[in-house]
Amino acid sequence: MKSRDLWITMLALTAWGQAGEKPVLVVETLASVTEPSFTEPLDASWSVAHGTWTPEKGELKAVEVPADKHVAVLHHNVALPTAVFECEFLSEGPFAFYIGCDGTNGHIGRAVVNGNGMVIAEDSVKPSHVLAKLERKVKPGDWHSLRVEWRGSEMAARLDGKELTASHPFLEKAKSRSWLAVSGTVLVRRLLVRGAAGQP
């Protein structure tokens, strides 16, 4: 690596270290897109599709509603071809917590955490095609850290310091929005979304 390129990489890593967790995939510095306080209603870039999503006292409580016959879903209606999501979450009992991205014709990819660990999957088929899997007990009632990234045909995630990376051509499809989803009840705090915005 040339000395100039090394210097640029070191600067990027330093900036990430000051602003959040060490990168898994995306080393360039991305602009902050949203960092909701969860002490007031979510802004207009967010929309609830299913379930209830209630911000209160610095936490976002997501609850799956059985009558919906669908996991709780919260859309972030900003096109982010490259993105990094960072947050902490706590589940109240059995759960699944998703962070994913959509194109204009449906889901593209997702990271999914449950009590047994985490997977990265792409959505060219149903059910989703699992690309990478981490087996790890994720205890309800404890706070856990999660970072999810995507860029081009790649997706990566870190759960409590353990990392997954995956690549698939379908992940390169144009992104029109991203989303959080929950099965069961999950609290989310310290959510930070960074990204390079663009057209889907």
Image (cartoon, rainbow, N blue to C red):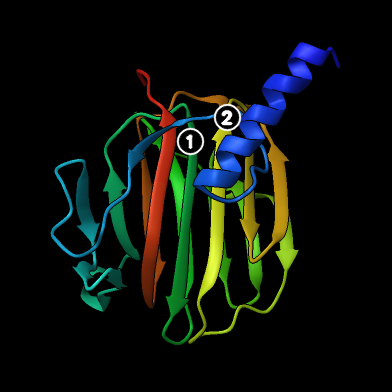
Q: Is residue 190 above or below residue 115?
A: above
The residue sitting at 63% across, 37% down in the picture is 14
Q: Is residue 16 above or below residue 105?
A: below
Q: Nearer the viewer, residue 119 or 42?
A: 42
Residue 193 as seen in the image, left or right of residue 35: right
Are the two marked residues, 1 and 2, in contact with CB atoms closer than 8 angstroms? yes
Label 1 vs label 2: CA separation? 7 Å
Residue 163 occupies which quadrant of the picture? bottom right
Q: Quadrant of the C terminus?
A: top left
Kind of residue indicated by mark 2:
Arg
Kind of residue indicated by mark 1:
Ala
- On residue 151, the disc is 2
State how many labels appear.
2
Residue 94 as seen in the image, left or right of residue 43: right
Examine the rendering and report whether any part of residue 122 can be seen: no
Q: Quadrant of the N terminus?
A: top right
- On residue 83, the disc is 1
The residue sitting at 71% across, 30% down in the picture is 10
- Element class at badge 2: strand
Instruction: Tell me where residue 151 appears, x and y as whole percent.
Output: 57, 29
Examine the rendering and report whether any part of residue 179 can be seen: yes
Q: How many residues crowd mark 2 within 10 Å: few (<14), some (14–19), many (20+)?
A: some
- Element class at badge 1: strand
